[in-house]
Image (cartoon, grey):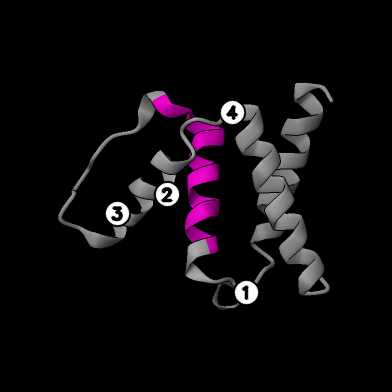
Amino acid sequence: MSNKDLDTLFDEAFNNAQLIPQESVPQNVQLVLYGLYKQATSGTSNIQVQNPQDLINAFKLNAWIQVKHLTIEEAKQNYIDIINELMRERNL
């Protein structure tokens, strides 16, 4: 699969994610998706601690750090796979 194909699928998955009711996705899955999205769009070079006292941001940062070993392409593919599965589970 070429990068353009992967990028197109990633963009489609991101748009599809907006169709999934947020309350129907467990918070741990939301955090995984956040980490994958950040890794897919920014890579590991942009990981920064903004406000470590803010619990929500700490969880988000941790989710991103947990996937920093993935390449941008791997993060995109994992994101696509999770969104597609959530869409199937919700018959969307």
> Helix, strand, or loop for circle 1?
loop
Residue 21 marker: 1
Q: Provide residue 80's location: percent of width, then percent of height.
A: 71, 47
- Return the residue at label 3: 57
> Helix, strand, or loop for circle 3?
helix
Q: Nearer the viewer, residue 20 or 30?
A: 30
Q: What kind of residue is marked 3?
A: Asn
> Is-magenta flag for residue 65?
no
From the image, state whether disc 3 or disc 1 is nearer to you: 3
- Return the residue at label 4: 72
Q: How busy is the neighbourhood of tag 4: few (under 14 within 10 Å), some, or many (20 plus)?
A: many
> Is-magenta flag for residue 40?
yes
Q: Quadrant of residue 18?
A: bottom right
Q: Provide residue 53's location: percent of width, then percent of height.
A: 15, 55
Decide if residue 66 is on the left or right side of residue 47: right
Residue 63 marker: 2
The reply to whether dot 4 and dot 1 touch (C-beta < 8 Å) is no
Q: What kind of residue is marked 2?
A: Ala
Q: What kind of residue is marked 1?
A: Pro
From the image, state whether disc 2 or disc 3 is nearer to you: 2
The reply to whether dot 2 and dot 3 touch (C-beta < 8 Å) is no
Quadrant in which the N terminus is drawn: top right
Q: Provide residue 29's location: percent of width, then percent of height.
A: 55, 62
